[in-house]
């Protein structure tokens, strides 16, 4: 049953039940799941790709396929996929994007992983969706590649919003709702768009983020698996190798790159997302990171790992992208742990994500020390625990 906005109307809403959370946030009129109906009513690119995995796990292949398709509603003819789709209220995009329907920046292209995961479950991904994924990856590769081989992020919203890694690009001291918020809106006005309203540069913010590049490389590999085409595998390997050159053994992290001479020192802050290259690395000297994730002097915490290493001066366990724990990062690290043979860690990450989701109403993110839920709730991607190793309820 759906109500007038196209949302399901579960008879007994239960925020500890992932199926109920997903049903309540699903919009049948537009074919996607809002991350949260109040805080995030529209479609966000990487959220929707994670929702595909959750719907598949819930046995709703119909919704998984519809949501994957809707990710491309505003794909430009050149392949660019925007990070927000404002259907059914296209004018909501005007502020700050200056166009109707969608934003002009992107987010990690998790669609290739979503499609590959469906295919591994025996679900047929339609050819037109597979083609659109390829166009998106091709566009990223051609339009964002820096001469160092890595792809450039053009706005903090493309990956880790309030990350301390961006602090050199904003006013100090960090002030989330004041000067930093204003700066992010300013960074929208400095975006340079192509003739299809896709951002192609930003004189004020150009960063080759380790996290973003790790997710692109991972998705290139997933697309190679899905299509069986070698050229995607070659690109995946090339990008992973370029990323591996950014490993800093002393700091035990991958470092973001930037040509910006003034900014750039904050690029070495040890954030959890900067360890996502574990998904694709070929290095044989990064094994110590698996211990770091549970070490209470580093990332470890009872409901962790923490989003920023605990000995960083900026670490704030309640902070949005500044130390709190995130379900999508737990999911991605669980895949990386499995890849490296750390099945026990993958299962631990699942158990933590599940415990928080079911006891704290599926929060957007949480304090990894106390387990207190933070941000919007119920947030759809908190239900990712059912798609993690050892997962289903
Ligand atoms: C926040 C997060 C972003 C996410 C969005 C919707 O903006 O920083 O990663 O996609 O919320 O959940």
Image (cartoon, rainbow, N blue to C red):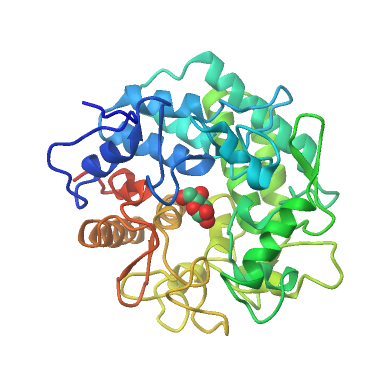
As drawn, 169 above or below 220: below
| Residue 65 location (% of width, % of height) | 41, 24
Q: In screen coordinates, is 279 left or right of 13?
A: right
User: What residue is shown at x 67% (from left), y 64% (from top)?
Assistant: 182
Which of the two residues, 75 or 228, is positioned nearer the viewer here?
75
Q: Quadrant of the N terminus?
A: top left
Mark yes or no: residue 262 visible: yes
Viewer-proximal residue, 152 or 246?
152
Residue 317 coordinates in the image, percent (x, y):
43, 76
Please report the residue visible at 74 percent of the width from the left and 36 percent of the height from the top: 198
**Left or right of residue 170: residue 13:** left
Residue 379, compared with residue 115, is above or below; it is below
Please provide percent x and percent y for residue 245: 73, 60
Judging depth in this view, the residue of 73 and 352 nearest the camera is 73
- At horizontal 57% and vertical 80% (from top left) the residue drawn is 314
Question: In which image quadrant can residue 371 be found?
Answer: bottom left
User: Looking at the image, can residue 282 be seen?
Assistant: no
Vertical side of 98 occupied by 284: above or below = below
């Amino acid at each position: 049953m759906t109500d007038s906005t196209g949302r399901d109307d579960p008879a007994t809403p239960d925020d500890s039940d992932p199926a109920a959370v997903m049903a309540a946030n699903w919009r049948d009129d537009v074919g996607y799941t809002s991350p949260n109906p109040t805080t995030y009513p529209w479609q966000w690119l990487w959220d929707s790709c994670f929702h595909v995995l959750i719907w598949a796990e819930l046995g709703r292949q119909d919704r998984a396929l519809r949501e994957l398709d809707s990710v491309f509603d505003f794909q430009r003819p050149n392949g660019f996929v925007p990070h927000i789709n404002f259907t059914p209220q296209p004018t909501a995009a005007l502020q700050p994007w200056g166009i109707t329907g969608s934003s002009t920046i992107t987010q990690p292209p998790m669609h290739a992983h979503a499609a590959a995961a469906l295919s591994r479950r025996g679900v047929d991904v339609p050819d037109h969706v597979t083609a659109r994924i390829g166009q998106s990856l091709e566009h990223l590769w051609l339009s964002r590649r820096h001469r160092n081989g890595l792809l450039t992020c053009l706005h903090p919203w493309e990956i880790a919003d309030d990350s301390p890694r961006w602090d050199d690009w904003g006013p100090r001291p960090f002030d989330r709702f004041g000067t930093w918020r204003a700066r992010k809106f300013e960074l929208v006005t400095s975006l340079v768009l192509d003739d299809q309203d896709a951002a192609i540069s930003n004189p004020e913010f150009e960063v080759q983020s380790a996290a973003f590049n790790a997710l692109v490389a991972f998705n290139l590999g997933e697309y190679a698996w899905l299509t069986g085409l070698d050229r995607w595998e070659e690109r995946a390997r090339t990008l992973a190798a370029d990323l591996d050159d950014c490993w800093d053994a002393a700091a035990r992290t991958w470092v973001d790159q930037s040509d910006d001479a003034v900014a750039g020192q904050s690029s070495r802050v040890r954030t959890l997302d900067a360890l996502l290259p574990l998904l694709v690395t070929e290095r044989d000297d990064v094994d110590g990171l698996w211990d770091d994730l549970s070490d209470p002097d580093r990332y470890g915490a009872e409901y962790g790992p923490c989003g920023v290493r605990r000995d960083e001066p900026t670490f704030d366990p309640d902070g949005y992208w500044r130390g709190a724990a995130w379900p999508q990062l737990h999911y991605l690290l669980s895949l990386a742990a499995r890849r490296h043979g750390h099945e026990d860690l993958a299962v631990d990450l699942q158990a933590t994500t599940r415990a928080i989701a079911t006891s704290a109403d599926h929060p957007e993110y949480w304090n990894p020390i106390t387990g207190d839920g933070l941000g919007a709730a119920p947030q759809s991607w908190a239900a990712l625990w059912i798609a993690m190793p050892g997962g289903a309820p």
